[in-house]
Image (spheres, helix red, strand yellow):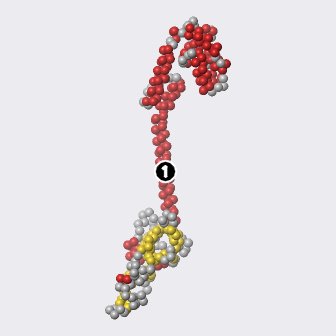
């Protein structure tokens, strides 16, 4: 009424929203919209308006609480980074009684856009608020700012984040376990033929392999089988005798072997395999393979089969081997 006295502003610029308060002789809290009554000569004779009850505000503005059961809305006066919780209207399943009796509610905005609100009793709340205009810019009470906020106890938000993280970790673990299991099954299905094929190569069973339906492995076996076939046709056993020039040259070339190569060769004559020779001479199998290459080159042989053929002839000549 005092603001309307002597003012030339229209009634649409003179109204006032009275903050939440309890009606006299009643327990119900309401907000009052007050409009001055002005006579034709400009005299202010009283006020009129209407009330917005706390119950109506709650029914119309309660936020969905399917996830956060204690979330609530609040319409409150705002001043100097504070919300006046004692003069606010509340809507939600959570009554927020500590706030309604706690006076100013300072807040601090975080980097993630949320704000933390500090109640007088030491409790904290997390949420968002937005300043709203309930007065025109040129109204008498345009300096009175109000804010609409959505809040919840901070502990509820933390518990929800922990639960979401727990579910995410469980899902991630299940996905990881599924990926490892799928990888193991695929690897077993794809790698088993390769491992089996390599084992046959190692065992010297190139000519009896079964197709793996893996192009590279099948091509390798075909190549090795062709090499074995070519090596066996280069020197038929019936064409090599003790008196043949090939055998005589072989015996002559033995003298060109180094002491280490001769040690390996002598053990071949005694019937030992490459693996056994490596164990006897305390050498690695790779070293034995290196000696084999040099022995083949010096004795002019192309394969282990050819070498063993000449070794057999030497054994028969020396009387080491008799009829099997």
* Quadrant of image for the N terminus: bottom left
Name the residue: 48% across, 34% down: 191
**Quarter of the image where one finds residue 138:** bottom left
- Vertical comparison of 121 with 6: above or below: above
- Residue 11, quarter of picture: bottom left
Q: Residues within 10 Å of mark 1 (few under 14, many from 20)?
A: few
Number of numbered tags placed on the structure image: 1
Left or right: where does residue 248 sit relative to residue 12?
right
Q: Position of residue 272 (x, y in %)?
A: 61, 19
Q: Is residue 6 visible?
A: yes
The one of 235 and 107 positioned closer to us in this rendering = 235
**Closest to the observer: 92 or 118?**
118
Quadrant housing the C terminus = top right
Foreground residue among 154 and 47: 47
Seen from this angle, which residue lies furthest left? 40
Q: In the drawing, does residue 285 fall left or right of residue 126?
A: right
Choose between 188 and 114: the one closer to the eye: 114
Residue 235 percent location from the top left of the image: 51, 13
Identified at 54% across, 75% down, the residue is 120
Q: Residue at x 56, y 13 (%)?
A: 309
Residue 49 vertical position relative to residue 125 in the rendered view, above or below: below
Which residue, given by chain and number where applicable, does mark 1 sit on? 172
Q: Secondary structure at mark 1?
A: helix
Whether residue 100 is visible here, answered yes or no, is no
> Residue 173's spot in the image, x, y percent?
50, 49
Which residue appears farthest toward the top when viewing the image?
A: 243
The residue shown at (48%, 65%) is: 113
Is 220 placed above or below 244 here? below
Tell me where residue 256 appears, x and y as whole percent. 63, 15
């Amino acid at each position: 009424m005092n603001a309307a006295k002597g003012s030339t502003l229209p009634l649409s610029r003179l109204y006032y929203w009275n903050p939440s308060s309890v009606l006299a002789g009643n327990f119900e809290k309401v907000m009052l919209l007050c409009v001055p009554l002005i006579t034709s000569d400009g005299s202010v004779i009283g006020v009129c308006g209407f009330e917005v009850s706390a119950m109506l505000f709650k029914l119309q503005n309660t936020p969905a609480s399917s996830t956060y059961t204690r979330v609530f809305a609040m319409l409150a006066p705002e001043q100097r980074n504070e919300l006046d919780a004692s003069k606010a209207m509340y809507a939600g399943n959570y009554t927020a009684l500590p706030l309604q009796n706690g006076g100013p509610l300072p807040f601090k905005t975080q980097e993630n856009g949320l704000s933390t609100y500090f109640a007088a009793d030491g409790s904290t709340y997390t949420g968002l608020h937005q300043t709203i205009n309930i007065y025109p810019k040129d109204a008498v009470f345009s300096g009175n700012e109000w804010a609409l906020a959505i809040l919840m106890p901070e502990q509820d938000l933390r518990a929800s984040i922990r639960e979401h993280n727990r579910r995410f970790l469980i899902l991630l673990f299940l996905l990881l376990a599924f990926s490892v299991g799928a990888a193991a099954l695929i690897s077993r299905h794809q790698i088993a033929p390769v491992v089996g094929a390599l084992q046959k190569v190692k065992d010297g069973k190139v000519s009896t392999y079964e197709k793996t339906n893996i192009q590279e492995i099948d091509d390798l076996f075909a190549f090795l089988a062709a090499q074995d076939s070519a090596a066996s046709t280069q020197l038929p056993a019936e064409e090599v005798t003790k008196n043949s020039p090939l055998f005589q040259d072989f015996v002559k070339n033995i003298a060109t072997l180094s002491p280490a190569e001769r040690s390996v060769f002598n053990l071949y004559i005694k019937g030992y395999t490459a693996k056994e020779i490596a164990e006897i001479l305390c050498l690695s199998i790779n070293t034995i393979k290196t000696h084999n290459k040099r022995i083949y080159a010096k004795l002019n042989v192309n394969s282990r089969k050819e070498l063993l053929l000449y070794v057999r002839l030497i054994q028969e000549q020396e009387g080491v081997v008799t009829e099997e």
